[in-house]
Image (spheres, rainbow, N blue to C red):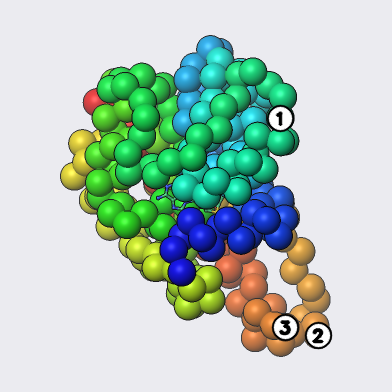
């Protein structure tokens, strides 16, 4: 199944808001760290329900936020969730961004980058639209060091690129970014049941669930355009 078809189905089933709830646990810390200034133009790649674009305007003071998503159903839902004239959503592939060179101050992406058919080309494209000094905060839960995520492509039924921490840094540098930061942002909100509740559907032991959420968390790589 194509990524677009898979997420069209998710959006139609209301799973966009469910994802938002899960991803918000770490995404909100990433959004809070972005060096956004009042009036900035910001981009959310693979926007899903569009929560990050709304938060960047409402909580961070961005002047204009655009959410881009390959799924028309996701975009149609995201449009429904706001009436802010400062937030816009577009159907498109983040490998071909409909923005002029140097037009964007900062970009964000949560749990979307690894679906790209050509992730290295996406980094080059994001680098193109960012102005000098602009940043790309790329957050993923599917990555090599997170062994708990390795079964996702089979479960979701779409291809994903699994890089490790060093591969992210290397790819950012190859695309022309400086790597300003790399971090693992813990999820402190997902409820972890007491030890006697294990094994659960997802985890053999409480320790493994603690490792997945509290220790591995979300891998964040931040690139800055020189
Ligand atoms: C797992 S969802 C995450 C959505 C949202 N960022 C969140 O945190 O909940 C991944 C999203 O990326 C979108 N996506 C995947 N590949 C894409 C591409 N090449 N271009 C644009 N959007 C893409 C999907 O349609 C989907 O809405």
Q: Nearer the viewer, mark 1 or mark 2?
A: 1
Disc 3 residue: CB within 8 Å of ligand 1: no
Q: Which residue is mark 1?
A: 82
Nearer the observer, 192 or 122: 122
Q: Which residue is mark 2?
A: 196
The image quadrant of residue 38 is top right
Vertical order, 142 against 54 (above or below): below
Vertical order, 47 against 62 (above or below): below
Q: Is residue 29 left or right of residue 104?
A: right
Q: Nearer the viewer, mark 1 or mark 3?
A: 1
The residue depicted at 61 percent of the width and 61 percent of the height is 9
Near mark 3 (Cα within 10 A), the count class, few <14, some 14-19 or many ≥20, is few
* Mark 3–mark 2 distance (CA, rounded to whole Å): 10 Å
How many marks overall?
3
Sequence-wise first label, 1 or 3:
1
Q: Which residue is mark 3?
A: 200
Q: Position of residue 224 (x, y in %)?
A: 33, 31
Secondary structure under the numbered disc 2 in the rendered image: helix
Vertical order, 224 against 15 (above or below): above
Nearer the observer, 85 or 39: 85
Nearer the observer, 85 or 191: 85
């Amino acid at each position: 199944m194509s990524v677009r078809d898979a997420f069209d189905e998710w959006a139609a089933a209301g799973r966009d808001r469910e994802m938002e709830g899960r991803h918000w646990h770490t995404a909100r810390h990433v959004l809070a760290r972005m060096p956004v200034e009042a009036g900035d133009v910001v981009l959310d790649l693979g926007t899903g329900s569009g929560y990050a674009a709304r938060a960047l305007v409402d909580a961070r003071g961005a002047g204009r936020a655009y959410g881009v998503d390959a799924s028309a159903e996701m975009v149609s839902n995201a449009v429904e969730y706001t009436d802010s004239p400062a937030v816009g959503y577009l159907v498109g592939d983040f490998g071909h961004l409909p923005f002029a060179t140097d037009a964007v101050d900062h970009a964000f992406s949560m749990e979307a980058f690894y679906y790209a058919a050509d992730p290295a080309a996406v980094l080059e494209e994001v680098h193109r639209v960012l102005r000098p000094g602009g940043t790309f905060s790329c957050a993923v839960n599917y990555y090599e060091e997170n062994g708990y995520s390795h079964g996702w492509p089979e479960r979701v039924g779409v291809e994903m690129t699994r890089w490790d921490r060093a591969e992210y840094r290397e790819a950012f540098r190859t695309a022309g970014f400086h790597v300003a930061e790399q971090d693992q942002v813990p999820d402190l909100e997902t409820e972890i049941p007491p030890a006697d509740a294990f094994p659960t559907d997802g985890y053999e032991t409480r320790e493994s669930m603690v490792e997945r959420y509290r220790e591995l968390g979300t891998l964040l790589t931040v690139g800055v355009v020189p």
